[in-house]
Image (cartoon, grey):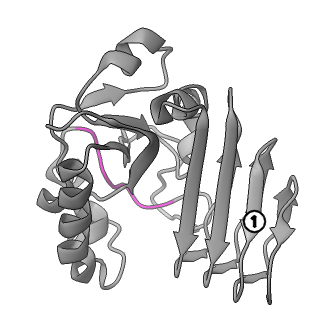
Amino acid sequence: MPAVMAGLLFWDVDTQYDFMFSDGKLYVPDAENTLPALARLTRFARARGVRIVASVDHHSLGDPELAASPDYRTTYPPHCLAGSPGAAKVDATRAIDPLWIDAAPVDATAVARHRGEIVFRKQRFDVFTNPNVSIYGTALSGLGTVKVTIARSSLVNNGYGPTVDAGTGAAIMTVSESIVTGNNVGYYNNGATLESLGNNTFRSNISNTGAMVLVGLQ
């Protein structure tokens, strides 16, 4: 594996069987059509030494997010149960030499020296409910600055829309050509920089936290 490129992260969000295939427990329509692109992006990052960081749902039946009669806003049907086939990452993004990080505090030096891929486990939709994401995200970049871009995405009827947290360093998130509607929190910004680039739709979200800078036509 090439040396890790400082200052750049490839973030892989919840590419697990239960979301990606039609017989999964919480299938996202047409998700399987993105698999070839996901495979190409993952190979590209690995070939160039870009640090790969992922999140995965890691549930047990007692988790508050799971419900027999879900509202699909804060509760969902059982999915990605720990150890089940549905919780497995798809082949296109299956982690190489992963370091699995749960919510319990983790030694920062162990994360910094790990040469494989980093996977944060979570029990809620919002990745920042695993506190180690905020603590270690900036350190993983190698420069103390994390830059995230969301483009041509739909964040609809979820707990949170775009979420950015400065943690121990500076963070920048840009959103473009995306739809963010019907969420409990339309966007969340804790001390970072959140920019809305042209042609986004933000509406019918219950609340927002922090500031978002509007750039270009909305």
Image location (x, y in percent) of residue 161 = 66, 64
Residue 86 included in the magenta stretch of the image: no
Q: Which residue is mark 1?
A: 195
Nearest the eye: 91 or 185:
91
The C terminus - image quarter: bottom right
Image location (x, y in percent) of residue 208 = 84, 61
Under mark 1, the amino acid is Glu
Span shown in magenta: 76-82
In the rendered view, tell whether residue 135 sits above or below residue 62: above
The N terminus - image quarter: top left
Nearest the eye: 196 or 162:
196
Please name the predominant secondary structure of the magenta segment in the image. loop
In the rendered view, tell whether residue 99 sits above or below residue 146: above
Image location (x, y in percent) of residue 211 = 88, 57
Q: Is residue 135 left or right of residue 34?
A: right
In the rendered view, tell whether residue 198 sits above or below residue 107: below
Rendered residue at 65%/58% (across/down) = 173
In the rendered view, tell whether residue 61 sits above or below residue 174: above
Q: Is residue 174 left or right of residue 22?
A: right
Rendered residue at 25%/26% (across/down) = 115
Could you say whether the residue bearing mark 1 is in a helix, strand or loop? strand
Q: Is residue 162 visible?
A: no
Rendered residue at 27%/36% (across/down) = 117
Q: Is residue 36 visible?
A: yes
